[in-house]
Amino acid sequence: MPEEVKEERRARFMALQAKISAAKLQRKVGRTLKVLIDEPGVGRSSADAPEIDGVVRFKGGKSGEFADVLIERADEHDLHGRKL
């Protein structure tokens, strides 16, 4: 199969997947999630696998701690919120 065809198909797949991911994450806006802090300002919920899924972004926190984060917005891959 020509490389151009592979790339075109991959691009279509990735665009569709980005829409699906954004819609799924949008449903979490307004919820409070318990987040494990990987580094200050970046963590993950129990539904997020490291190095595979997106992250939860917020201000503050200390690595290794848990924080409750109110999710205020979402993009295609990550959640953004405020640490409570």
Image: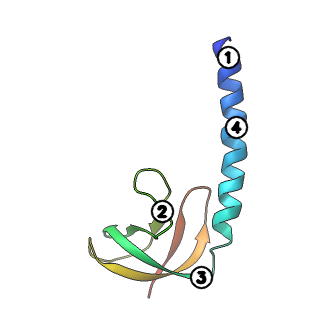
Q: How far apart, in angstroms, are the residues tagged by discs 1 and 4?
A: 14 Å
Foreground mark, 2 or 3, reads: 2
Q: Amino acid at mark 4?
A: Phe
Earlier-in-chain disc, 4 versus 3: 4
Quarter of the C terminus within the rendering: bottom left
Name which residue lies at 42% across and 75% down. Answer: 35
Earlier-in-chain disc, 1 versus 3: 1
The residue to which callout 4 is attached is 13
Quarter of the N terminus within the rendering: top right
Q: Is residue 75 above or below residue 31?
A: above
Name which residue lies at 40% across and 56% down. Answer: 50
Foreground mark, 1 or 2, reads: 2
The residue to which callout 1 is attached is 4
Q: How far apart, in angstroms, are the residues tagged by discs 4 and 3?
A: 29 Å
Earlier-in-chain disc, 2 versus 3: 3
Q: How far apart, in angstroms, are the residues tagged by discs 1 and 3?
A: 42 Å
Earlier-in-chain disc, 1 versus 4: 1
Identify which residue, 11 or 58, lies in the foreground.
Answer: 11
The residue to which callout 2 is attached is 48
Earlier-in-chain disc, 4 versus 2: 4
Sort mark 1 into few (<14), some (14-19) or many (20+) by Cα contacts within 10 Å: few
Q: Amino acid at mark 3?
A: Arg
Foreground mark, 1 or 4, reads: 4
Say whether residue 22 is left or right of residue 64: right
Foreground mark, 4 or 2, reads: 2
Q: Which mark is residue 75?
A: none
Q: Which mark is residue 31?
A: 3
Q: Is residue 81 above or below residue 48?
A: below
Give the secondary structure at mark 2: loop
